Image (cartoon, helix red, strand yellow):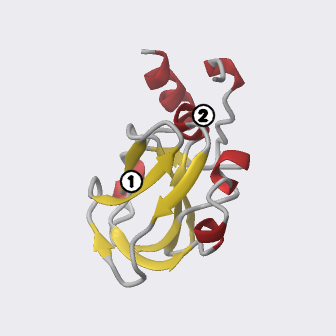
Amino acid sequence: MKELDELILPDDIRYSADHEWARIEDEFAYIGISDFAQDQLGDIVFVDMPEVGDSFDQGDEFGSLESVKAVSEMYMPLSGEVVEINEDLSESPELLNADPYENWIIKIRMEDLEDYDQLLDAEAYLESLEE
């Protein structure tokens, strides 16, 4: 497992306390898991994703990840409607281990931009991991 100073934490995205990330592009947001999450899970073997058209509030469970170690739920960092899922993960869930930021899980149409302001920047997220 990686040491905290080895984690990749891009500055252009925000993080939830549950280890999901969100990157905004126009009225949409891409949602994925952090480098810390994929590192803790180990080899990811299955991604359970919602359906296009499903809507979630911030904090709602929207799917799960199965690894060789455990099954872990994923929680919405932002409220919104799913407009796209990353189909590549159905065939190759290990892409999340290879690059958890390039390989997003879902794309949503955001309901409330203020949700984004409640998420942690990279520095605050790292501080939360250190605690």
Q: Quadrant of residue 38?
A: top right
Q: Is residue 19 left or right of residue 102?
A: left
Q: Nearer the viewer, residue 94 or 80?
A: 94
Residue at point 62%, 42% (across, down): 43
User: In the rendered view, would you say 126 is above or below 117?
Assistant: above
| Residue 4 visible in rendering | yes
Q: Quadrant of residue 93?
A: bottom right
Specify the quadrant that holds the C terminus: top left
> Which circle, 1 or 2, is nearer the viewer?
2
How busy is the neighbourhood of tag 2: few (under 14 within 10 Å), some, or many (20 plus)?
Answer: some
- The spot of residue 29 in percent (x, y) is 51, 66
| Residue 22 visible in rendering | no
Q: Nearer the viewer, residue 124 or 76?
A: 76
Q: Mark 1 or mark 2: which comes first in sequence?
A: 2
Specify the quadrant that holds the N terminus: top right
User: In the rendered view, would you say 12 is above or below 25?
Assistant: above
- The spot of residue 14 in percent (x, y) is 51, 46
User: Which element type, helix, strand or loop, lies under badge 1?
Assistant: loop
User: Which element type, helix, strand or loop, lies under badge 2?
Assistant: helix
- The spot of residue 82 in percent (x, y) is 42, 76
Q: Which residue is mark 2?
A: 39
Q: Which residue is mark 1?
A: 77
Q: Nearer the viewer, residue 127 or 2?
A: 2
Q: Amino acid at mark 1?
A: Pro
Residue 118, numbered label: none
- Real-space Cα distance between discs 1 and 2? 19 Å
Instruction: Give the farthest residue toward the top.
Output: 131
User: In the rendered view, would you say 23 is above or below 121?
Assistant: below
